[in-house]
Amino acid sequence: MSNFYETMLNNKLGRKLLKGVGLPTPIELRRYDPSQPRFFAGNILLGASLNAQLLDDTLRNLSASHANVYFPANAQSASLILKTADKHGIKAVGIECSKDMSQKFDALLFDGSGLNDATDLNQLYTFFNPVMRKLNNNGRVILMGRPPLEVKTGEQAAAMRALEGFSRSIAKEIGKKSATAQALYVANKAEANMDSALRFLLSAKSAYVDGQVIHVRPADVIEYPDWHKPLQGKVALVTGAARGIGEAIARTLARDGATVLGLDIPPAEVDLKRVMSDIQGQMLLADIASPDAPALIANTLKEMGGADIIVHNAGITRDKTLANMPEHWWQMTIDINLAAEERINHVLFNDNILNPNSRIICVSSMNGIAGQVGQTNYAASKAGVIGYVQYMGPKLLKKGITINAVAPGFIETAMTDAIPFMTREVGRRLNSLSQGGKPVDVAETIAFFANPASSGVSGNVVRVCGQSLVGA
Ligand code: NAD
């Protein structure tokens, strides 16, 4: 806990003072703990719409966790839940859900794939209303459904899209408990591809991901690897790995078993060396925007046996209002943050450097979605990253490659520590979780995209922002 606000929170008088001036006191987010053997442990209340189609694979996943599964005993889907749980060796317990019940839950999971129209949305109210106050701190709410644009009728599309608005609103209501809510859309025939997304969202690894939507598409099914070493045997390139978010990405991918090639500019040599020697990685000093960088990267990765994971993290800001911005600031920001990534990918594709089932992950930004004064260059580059990922996502998926982006919000780094106190406190707490994220939160989301089992996750943009009110 490094900042003034957190120091205040840590003593009784400080908390009283903060409360007195109306500042929320956030509950510390529970993050990944290697001593927890499975992705989830605790009580889950499972609900399902009539004719729900994702229960089988949901319960298959829960059978790999330490979840105690409950379901509303009087729900119309109760017998289906019981039967499917039984099939997966889970002793699901029917429970009378009421506002007076003493039972608490660590996750509320609802399979809404069977919702057909607006009248069916009542099933959401019936499931969630009695139990909204029964969610523990750091709890999880997940709404599952079919992609709205891939269903058979307009009414069904409306019901599916409703899941998104519903989950985003729940996220805002439970944020004060440091609990999160998301929507997970699983396409037809992609049921067996949902494992990595469901496990990530239920786990502590998604601590600062809130109010997000993830799409899973049909792809070759790759069995979920070891929870603690999912990237064992993989080679990963991380650009901008010497410090900040890039350093956290390199450390997290290495923690998960990958061999990391960390790249940064020559002036960052000392820091890059420190990080790479800590994680037994390899280092490459290069400016990603230089003309020879793509070939240099491709050759180095070739010598390492090809690449499985490419993380385009290196980025810069050159902030000035457009009227005052020198042209070279415009050009270098677009070039480093966007064009260099495209040029590198071109060479990686053309020279066949990417191994089968490889993963590309780009780092966008919340400001690329919302826009920001003084950041026309930066926001254009980061929005460009989103356009690239959304276009390439489905196309690369046909070749067994996935591409996704993370869009970080307020992440505690040396950069944000330097922001003046009041501006920083506002930026830090203008989100549903009332706190800033950590570089590791961005890294965990990147590791989820990089997971071999994320074979059907492509073209997604996930904000790691605690459901920031900016650009929401
Ligand atoms: P940072 O400035 O701390 O680190 C960026 C790293 O990239 C540095 O090590 C730098 O030397 C390297 N780099 C810059 N230009 C390079 C080039 N041409 N070639 C090779 N390496 C280069 O920044 P950070 O806060 O860790 O941000 C990392 C990424 O996350 C960036 O893309 C940034 O735009 C994005 N981001 C950060 C935040 C945040 O809150 N920190 C929010 C949104 C998005």
Image (spheres, helix red, strand yellow):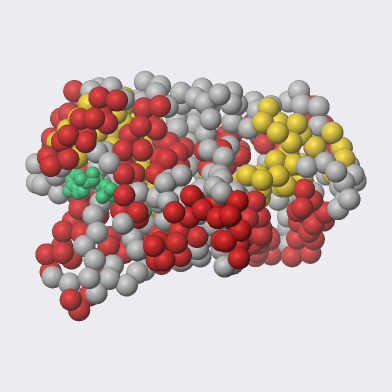
Q: Hey, which quadrant is residue 432 in on the image?
A: bottom right
Measured as percent of width and height from the top left, residue 271 is found at 21, 36
Residue 472 higher or lower than 206, as above or below: below
Residue 139 higher or lower than 447, as above or below: below
Residue 454 higher or lower than 365, as above or below: above
Q: How many marks?
A: 0
* Residue at (49% x, 31% y) in the render: 453
Does residue 466 appear to the left or right of 160 in the view shown?
left
Measured as percent of width and height from the top left, residue 67 is found at 71, 31
* Residue at (17% x, 40% y) in the render: 268
Measured as percent of width and height from the top left, residue 417 is found at 35, 54
Residue 115 visible in the current orientation: yes
Measured as percent of width and height from the top left, residue 112 is found at 70, 50
Does residue 173 appear to the left or right of 461 in the view shown?
right
* Residue at (26% x, 38% y) in the render: 241
63 vs 158, nearest the viewer: 63
Residue 346 visible in the current orientation: no
